[in-house]
Image (cartoon, helix red, strand yellow):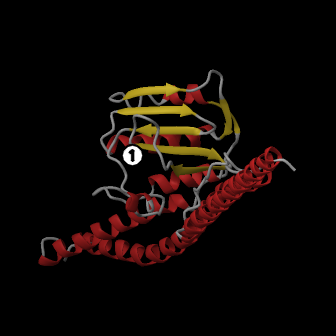
Amino acid sequence: MTSGHIHIIIYIAVGILAVLGFALWKFHRHQCLLRDRAYLMREAVRNRDFSFSLPVKGLFFGERAMQQALNDMSQDIKALEARKEVESWQKLTRVLTHEIMNAAAPICSISQAYLSAPHIKGTPYEEGITAIHQTSQSLAAFVENYRKLTSLEEADLAEVDLNALACSLKSLFTDVEWHIRLPKDISINADEGMMRQVLTNLIKNACESGSRDIEIRWDEALLVSNNGQPIPPDVAREIFVPFFTTKRTGSGIGLPLARLMLLKQGMNLSLAEHPSPGFHTTFVISRLP
């Protein structure tokens, strides 16, 4: 064997080793990528964040299918969690309103009877009994407001023209700049009255947070965006909890009621992790799986 042949064999061996080394490096790098993905998903589940959606680029076809299935599953879990959360709050609200009304109703009627009595009028007791009566009335009205969460009628589903629905809201909020970016002739199967109330609640909240720009657009779901005060992360986790509010005069049922209305129509309401470009907050109305 000549020295030329030996050199060729050495070059071939070095080339094979280089290719093998590169393949091993790529394999190791790919496994590290899968390990990091597993860690991110485990941490997301541990923190009850089911909105994770990891990219499928760079994966083999089997891994790509598995990642896509996990991404889809995260949305299913998120929707199921929203439904169960609303059902739990409905049950709790039903019990609380029943017990509070049982206590408030007699106080209201008895204090009213005392205020009507001649021997009470003009006495030092009148002012105290009036305060008791007014407080019991306020409590009854407060509880009645929360009964809305447990007494919604079933949805009457029909095809709803989204453009017509969005445009009909302009007359209710004339002091905002509207950006309606919906495909022509787009419609969804929904209860028109409930959908109008949901959008009204979202826009009313946006205006109360200082927004003067409202965008309604379609991107595989209905997106409602505003440029009002951004929602802090600690508040974002609570906004769909009944009774929770950061407003001094808020009731805390606007968003929970909107979500409940959508659940009755086979849809869900969520806060987008990343708002639409140019806006501080985006709510997503999406069809449940």
Q: Is residue 269 above or below residue 199?
A: below
Q: Nearest the camera: 83 or 10? A: 10
Quarter-of-image position of residue 202? top left
Residue found 84% across the figure and 47% down from its top: 2
Figure label count: 1
Q: Nearest the camera: 191 or 49? A: 49
What's the residue type where badge 1 is placed? Asn
Quarter-of-image position of residue 232? bottom left
- Looking at the image, the residue that sits furthest to the front is 2
- Looking at the image, the residue that sits furthest to the right is 1
Looking at the rendered structure, the secondary structure element under dot 1 is helix
Q: Is residue 209 visible?
A: yes
**Residue 289 percent across, percent down from the top left:** 72, 51
Q: Is residue 234 above or below residue 106?
A: above
**Residue 131 percent across, percent down from the top left:** 22, 70
Residue found 21% across the figure and 73% down from its top: 118
Relative side of 176 to 43, left or right: left
- Looking at the image, the residue that sits furthest to the top is 184
> For mark 1, what is the residue?
205
Residue found 25% across the figure and 71% down from its top: 115
Residue found 59% across the figure and 62% down from its top: 36
**Residue 45 percent across, percent down from the top left:** 59, 67
**Residue 224 percent across, percent down from the top left:** 49, 38
Q: Is residue 83 visible?
A: no
Judge the density around disc 1: few (<14), some (14-19), many (≥20) Cα neighbours within 10 Å. Answer: some
Relative side of 172 to 43, left or right: left
Q: Nearest the camera: 217 or 161? A: 217
Relative side of 67 to 98, left or right: right
Q: Nearest the camera: 15 or 211? A: 15
